[in-house]
Amino acid sequence: MRLFRRALYALGVASMVAAVLRLRGTGGSPPQQGGWRELSDTDLA
Amino acid sequence: MTGPAELRVGIVGLGAVGARVARQLVSDPRVAQVVLREPRRNHLDLVVESLGPKTVIDSGTDNAPLDADVVVIAAHNGEHGALATVAVRAGQSVVSTTDNIDDVRALLSLDAEAREREVSVVVGAGFAPGLTCLLAAQAARSFDAIDEIHVAKVGTGGPACAREHHRALSRSALDWREGAFVRRPGGSGRELCWFPDPVGAVDCYRAALPDALLLVPAFPGVRRVTARVAATRRDRLTMRLPMLWPTHPEGGPGAVRVEVRGQRGEARDVVVLGAMDRAAVASGAVAAVAAQRVAEGAVRRRGAGGLAELFSPGEVLTELRQRGVRVAVFQGDLAGETTAENGALDGADHTA
């Protein structure tokens, strides 16, 4: 019974850590410079 | 080939995208008549009343081919394969707006039959896939050889598109890696993708998207093709549940981004192209231009394939530009000069 409770507790902690990492983790860094330029008909030719 | 104002185009399904396709075609002087089929009779009557005398209601049964030169299928996902088969067997070219993997597979399997009957089956003629295929092909023109294509999209067309987007996140993604299709878990692989303004940076994830199925045949030798879709934390938490809230009937602003990596001379380089628009509006324009070009015979070959394979990207993107769908390139040397400042992509409606 004690082992079962410990396993359940460990599972709960692991799930919470996984949920936090999944939802709060960073997705990368955005470009530091640059921008979008519309393509003209010449660019598309 | 059909002459001026002789073209009859049929449309199956008048949701957010189908109605936009109809509007685009009605405004095209080369189109004589637009034949509409839609199970919701009240909705059909409203669309016909709104679009005027060029539109007619299809009088055939659901399983009969439409009386048209080209058929645009904008019906619910899951129906595209069967509808296209009927049209191809009637000798009609087909343009499908599907973004569903099973539909795309069914449509691509019509290739031999379509070639034999000398008709075209344009697969995935929407925002993504569709516009993204054209962007990939356009970007590839500047390379000697390409080896990676990475597609990302944000935004949905109408409610049916939003449901497909929701389902796609919980299903296995289909990536192309080193000569084979690989299944990856949907909702995994977070990547911060930088879309044209005003959308900006959005986290995107793997999902069941058909882009690799359409891009791999168009770019022989490509080593990696991936596709991602934008999702919020709420989307990811609820992705395995039914949609819990109503969707916007017309969808909101969307954007697509295609990153192509390859070899130019001795150097490796990256080109990033993107577009910002309302997804249903851009999808309508892409499908309408595809239908027009198929009817004119302006295709690279007959048979089934994606837009990258069947069309010359520059010509189609130029025509889309005239209809208001504008494409941009990301340039690292435009420090401090964004499109928001120069007014390049303001997301204006262009449904005339």
Image: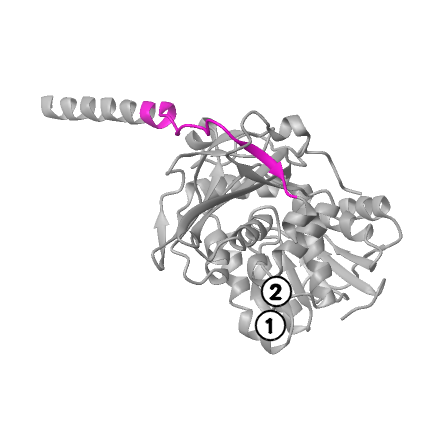
Is residue A29 a member of the stretch shown in magenta?
A: yes
Q: Is residue B338 left or right of residue B232?
A: right
Q: CA distance from mark 1 to mark 2?
A: 7 Å
Q: Amino acid at mark 1?
A: Ala
Residues B33 and B128: in front is: B128
Asked if the residue under mark 2 is in contact with the one under mark 1, i.e. CB atoms within 8 Å, the reply is: yes
Up/down of A20 relative to B53, above or below: above
How is the rendered protein coloured? one colour
Q: Residue at x 61, y 50 (%)?
A: B76
Q: Is residue A42 left or right of residue B136?
A: right
Q: Amino acid at mark 2?
A: Val
Identify the disc placed on residue B114.
1
Magenta segment boundaries in residue numbering: A20-39
Q: Residue at x 47, y 44 (%)?
A: B168
Q: Residue at x 80, y 64 (%)?
A: B7
Q: Position of residue B135 (x, y in %)?
A: 57, 49
Q: Identify the residue position indicated by label 2 in the image.
A: B121
Tell me which label, 1 or 2, sits earlier in the chain: 1
